[in-house]
Amino acid sequence: MRCVRRAVVVKESLASTSGRPLAAQCRVTIRGKSLKHHVAMQAIFVAWYNFARKNEALKNQTPAMANGLSDYLWTIKELIERAAG
């Protein structure tokens, strides 16, 4: 049951955090960017949220660090390099 609660909290936190950036991305997509570009922007945002953004509720860890997926804070450069790579 604990995992379910954590998933709901993370989902709600992500929804409140991503509201404005996602609205801007949606407007850009509607104006003519392809679905491929929109999906790529979403993937980079989710990676940034989980690997490169500290969360005070998680004792200044990223969600990936809190769940044991990473042991350090990633840089934006690392995210882009791994996405390209």
Image (cartoon, rainbow, N blue to C red):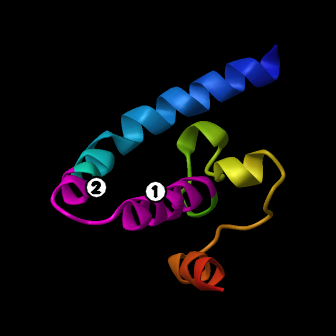
Which secondary structure lies at badge 2? Answer: helix
> Label 1: which residue?
42
Q: Residues within 10 Å of mark 2 (few under 14, many from 20)?
A: some
Residue 47 belongs to magenta span: yes
Residue at mark 1 to residue at mark 2: CA–CA distance: 8 Å
Residue 9 belongs to magenta span: no
Which residue ends up furthest to the left in the rendered image? 31
Which stretch did the figure color magenta? 27-50
Q: Residues within 10 Å of mark 1 (few under 14, many from 20)?
A: some
Q: What type is the residue that disc 1 sits on?
A: Gln
Q: Residue 51's spot in the image, x, y percent?
A: 63, 60
Q: Residue at x 54, y 80 (%)?
A: 80
| Lateral position of residue 3 relative to residue 12, left or right | right
Q: What type is the residue that disc 2 sits on?
A: Gln
Q: Residue at x 61, y 81 (%)?
A: 78
From this view, report whether residue 5 is shown above or below residue 22: above
Which secondary structure lies at badge 1? Answer: helix
Q: Nearer the viewer, residue 84 or 74?
A: 84
Q: Are marks 1 and 2 in contact (CB under 8 Å)?
A: yes
Quadrant containing the N terminus is: top right
Using the image, tell me which numbered label, if any, was put on residue 25.
2
Quadrant containing the C terminus is: bottom right
Q: Residue at x 61, y 53 (%)?
A: 50
| Lateral position of residue 26 relative to residue 7, left or right | left
